[in-house]
Image (spheres, grey):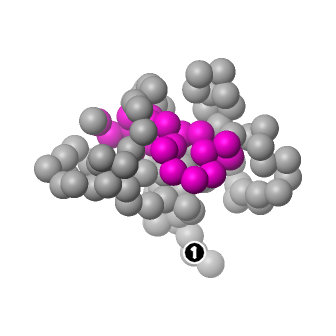
Amino acid sequence: MSQFDVHRNAGRNSAVIPFVVIVQSAAFDDRRRRIVVPLVATAKTQGHIKFPPAGVNPTFTLLGIKVILNPLEMTSVAVDALGEQVGSLADKGDVIVAALDEIFSQAWG
């Protein structure tokens, strides 16, 4: 299990949030939980969910599903509660970190 690995959402709302991405540093791999950010299926939002500017909510395509990163809903999940690993966004790690930086460091209001 590595930073930016993508897992199926094994919890409720999996139709709207089909995947989560691990954002926790490998420095904490010995812990029993992982900090994850939901990846929301854009086709399921239909304007019902309002997202901040695109820098905070980049989009990706996983298994043919267009998803949007929703870091304002990040959470901690037990390792044994994570669904199957279905991919990785390691090549988009800088984009994800920039989105997290925006909500933690750049929010001046």
Image location of residue 23, percent across then percent down = 38, 47
Q: Residue furthest bottom?
A: 109
The residue shown at (30%, 47%) is 80
For the record, the magenta segment spans 2-22
Image location of residue 106, percent across then percent down = 52, 65
The residue shown at (78%, 48%) is 45
Image location of residue 66, percent across then percent down = 68, 31
The residue shown at (45%, 26%) is 86
Classify residue 66 as left or right of residue 3: right
Classify residue 81 as left or right of residue 104: left
Q: Residue furthest right?
A: 47
Q: Say what amino acid the circle numbered 1 marks.
A: Trp
Pointer 1: what residue? 108
**Majority secondary structure in the magenta region:** loop
Q: Residue furthest left?
A: 30
Tell me if I can see residue 23 in this picture.
no
Quarter containing the C terminus = bottom right
What is the secondary structure assignment of the residue under circle 1? Answer: loop
- Please state which of residues 103 and 60 is positioned toward the viewer in this rendering: 60
Classify residue 27 as left or right of residue 72: left
Residue 10 colored magenta? Answer: yes
Tell me if I can see residue 79 in this picture.
yes
The residue shown at (46%, 66%) is 105
Q: Residue furthest top?
A: 64
- Please state which of residues 92 and 68 is positioned toward the viewer in this rendering: 68
Q: Quadrant of residue 53?
A: bottom right
Residue 48 colored magenta? Answer: no
Q: How many marks?
A: 1
Quarter containing the N terminus = top left
Image location of residue 37, percent across then percent down = 49, 51
Graded by Cα atoms within 10 Å as few (under 14), some (14 to 19) or many (20 or more), the crowding at tag 1 reads few
Q: Quadrant of residue 40?
A: top right
